Image (cartoon, coloured by chain):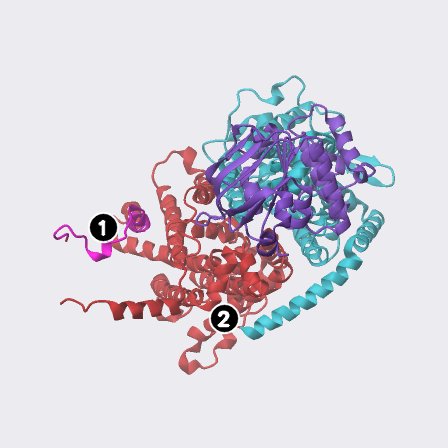
Amino acid sequence: MATTQKISSDLGDRLRDFRRAAGNVAGGGGLWAAIIIFTIWAAFAERDALTVGIVLGAILALGAVGLTLIFGVLKFAHFAHGDSMMLSAFIAWLLLNGIIVGERAGSETTLLPVTVNDLPGADNAIWQFSFGYGLIVAMLLTAVLTAGMMVAIDRVVYRRLRKRRSGIVIFAIASLGLAFVMRSVILIFWGPTPRLYTPGIRNRIDLPFDVSVLADQLFILAAAFVVTAIVYVLLFRTKLGKAMRAMADNPDLARISGIDTDRIITWTWVVAGFLIAVAGVLLALQAHLDSELGFTLLLPLFAAAIVGGLGNPQGALVGGFVVGITQEVAVTFDFLSPGYKFSVAFAILILILLVRPRGLFGERS
Amino acid sequence: MTETQAAPLLEAKNVVAGYVSEVDILHGVSITVHGGEMVAIVGPNGAGKSTLLRAIFGLLAARRGQISLKGQDITNRAPDELVLRGLSYVPQVDNIFPSLTILENLEMGAFIREEGLAERVDYILSLFSDLADRRGEKAGRLSGGQRQMLALGRALMLDPDVLLLDEPSASLSPKMVDMIFDRIKMINAEGTGILLVEQNAREALSVCHRGYVLAMGENRLEGEAKGLLDNEEVGKLYLGA
Amino acid sequence: MILGGKRPGWTRGLKPSDFIAPAVLLSITIAIPFISYDQSRGAFPDGNIAGTFSFYTAFLVTVGVYALLTLALNIQWGYTGVINFGVLAFFMLGAYTTAIITKGDPQGDFTDYIGGWGDNLDLIPALATDQWLPFVVATAAAAFAAGLLAFLVAFPTLRLREDYLAIATIGIAEVMRRVVIEERWMLNGSRGLTGVPQPLGNLVDQSDYKYLNVVIIGIVVIIVFFALERAVRSPWGRVLLGLRDDEEATAASGKNVFAFKTQSFVLGAAIMGIGGSMYAYAFSALSPDAFTHLFATFIFWAMLMVGGSGNNKGAIAGAYVVWGLWTISLQMQGYELGDIIESRMSYIRGLLLGAAIVGVLLIRPLGLLPQERRVSSWVERRVKKERSARAPPAET
């Protein structure tokens, strides 16, 4: 035992020294340089992959911002984030179509007497998109519902654990349990087959510089931009946002200053819920609705949040793009088949933990 | 001589408190602060000085005893209530929000009552001119002394009746210590009562009106600050002269 | 019997809540054979005891495998507080390592995998080594491979926060699945590996193998259980508990926190490898689709939480109870429950499993068998000696 201890502590020391040296070079400057060079190269060599990577990156960014907010204010790793996104996507689907899986496998029943698509012209495609304004209405409605759901879950589960002063790991396990509950709910109501908001061919738009993009993807980028701007304003220009950042910095001092921490926590879940819903719908729009996607999405989501620096929203934004682009471009290499996308995210995660664990924007603790 | 010796502004009577359920740190401590007074609490390490402040501010459950502010019972009330009633607390460490700007830090101090925010901010920044030039900077970049000033500033945003300070001079250079105590005296001159816990007993007793000496969770001595300073027994036993 | 108003000695100190665990275990033990008996009545009108017995044995085989994995998770999480959301990786690695060592060369056009040394390991035919040697080697290799993987993963992550390790373990599980599926030349991809030989397989007919298997697995579980019980009562084990309860204090007392955590993580992973190995023998067929996050990671968390984390007996009990409930609900699908429930039964089970974890955390975080107060075996023996020295002579 003693020798293995000595070996592992020697290795540990060497790793620490390596990390310190690597961190000084790769830290900040080096990492940024690598990212920028890689992106520029991809712009020339693998433009299509880069384009998809940017779109995926925007979606991951939205998800990661929510994740990092939860981490900052509530101080735990929310393992139900991916499945929450997917559940929101399905709720939006339900609001549009009103259908759930019927009694026997393969059949369907209508759950909602009235759906969003019943609104006049709701499913008439806007411009070149594959959807009408119905999707947008459904997305906003879902955002409200998801926000409510997250607050309810907090009341029932997380708040009780907070009162008991449970460790962060207990929260993580509880969120894992909830992830599976959500996944099961998706399967119970909509079954295992993947779905789309609107089946059929989707229009391509040709942009200058030989860039070809789906019309829907332009919408995704625009929506992500709008939501990000809103969140930015919230966090940096409103009292609530400042209080959220204060709580992320120092929850005790926030309490001492007289801030009602319970209320701030509730609002954090509301904001996170909005982000989850929008990110989920956009994800389903870009890929598809699928019960399996939620859990595995945790990998790129956490990678994005950690790359940016856990707790830092700007970091999560940048991290989302870094992971998205790297994922898509990396699988164009011969030795990596497309199935490895999320494994690439994992590789990025490990790399960051080795070289600069606090992330691009993280403060040295 | 202080004005009102009549009704105490802040009073703690026989407070018993501790962190872990079986162990008491305070075994029945009593202190009073009168309006406009500066009161120091000194004593050796582990005497329970910081614990007393936390118990007064509702951060720690007072198992027995009573705490009152302006004649009203505030035993075991939550911090946000106490802030509204005119009590404010500056912890010894982690007393600013590092990723928020100086201005935002101060805004947090006024979170529960926004009226007159701008004037208060101006007033506080005039008190601490070092911070005024850098109000848009992140608080994490400040030096130790500047952080302490900001911590004080945050606690003053709602013009509290009594300010609880936990070792404000800790880990500051002597020049900074003088400056901080200077500012504290100025704050007190404006009418805010001060309850000051200090390891640096000499400095604390030389600026305060009265003092209490605590040891092992109990009152040991109290009286006029000057008297305590001159008292040799105090110096030897409790102040590590 | 209660004589003269005095309760017999062994009932002293019992509380009503102490009866919950035995009651639950007993109800499941009765329910499973009962329901399977009821079910098989349709198929075997006369004498279906044999069918019931067979079913219960098969149930125990699975419980045994899962108990190993839950015990392993208990070492990592229950005793040391290291969080592993990627049990799947070590489970799968153990199973596949075992398969490629014990199987012979790939046969046929549609089968492709590395290894296949099974036929070469019949080193001493006189001692019937083909019956046991490849399996001993394979299981040892499974433990080693899983342990090595754990060591590699722990390195960059265990030094940091616990939630980083959790995420990293999800990652390693995902990578493991991906590699198996994508690199078909390595482990036959989604087609899976079939025909894994079974230890001592020649002794009985294939259809009766489960009875032998349950004994083998039972022995392995017992050995691992007692080894772990010794380990946690040793000085090493006490440091682990110190880590879980108060890491800072343990570090302050000079213990190398990282080293201990790594050792615990590696040990747990190695046992997961053994569990995977037993799985391969029991089911003889492996496929990446069988290793889902639900069945290869999550279910063990449920078992550990329900049974009682920090308690080896609890780990085994949890495996028994959770798999028991799962099996009962599977059996109940035979009953008329209405199409609306039947078609979703497996999903409802998944939901209940998730709810069980959350529920246990909220209501009875200690699980069925709460952890015992930690006493070192040295202290236990001293106390026993002193007690027997001071006790009055036994009355005859």
Badge number at residue C248: none
**Magenta segment: does it hold C15?**
yes
**Magenta segment: does it hold C163?**
no
Q: Colour of chain B?
A: purple
SS state under label 1: loop
Q: Nearer the viewer, residue B126 or C16?
A: B126
What residue do we see at 44% from left, 43% from top? C356
**Where does the magenta region start and end?**
C2-31
Residue with the mark numbered 2: C140
The percent position of residue C152, horizontal first and vertical second, equals 62, 64
| Quadrant of image for the C terminus of chain C | bottom left
- Find out whether the residues at labels 1 and 2 contact each other: C-beta distance under 8 Å: no
Principal secondary structure, stretch drawn in magenta: helix
Amino acid type of the residue that numbered disc 2 sits on in the rendered structure: Ala
Q: Colour of chain A?
A: cyan
The percent position of residue C144, horizontal first and vertical second, equals 54, 69
Q: Are marks 1 and 2 on the same chain?
A: yes
- The quadrant holding residue A104 is top left
- The quadrant holding residue C219 is bottom left
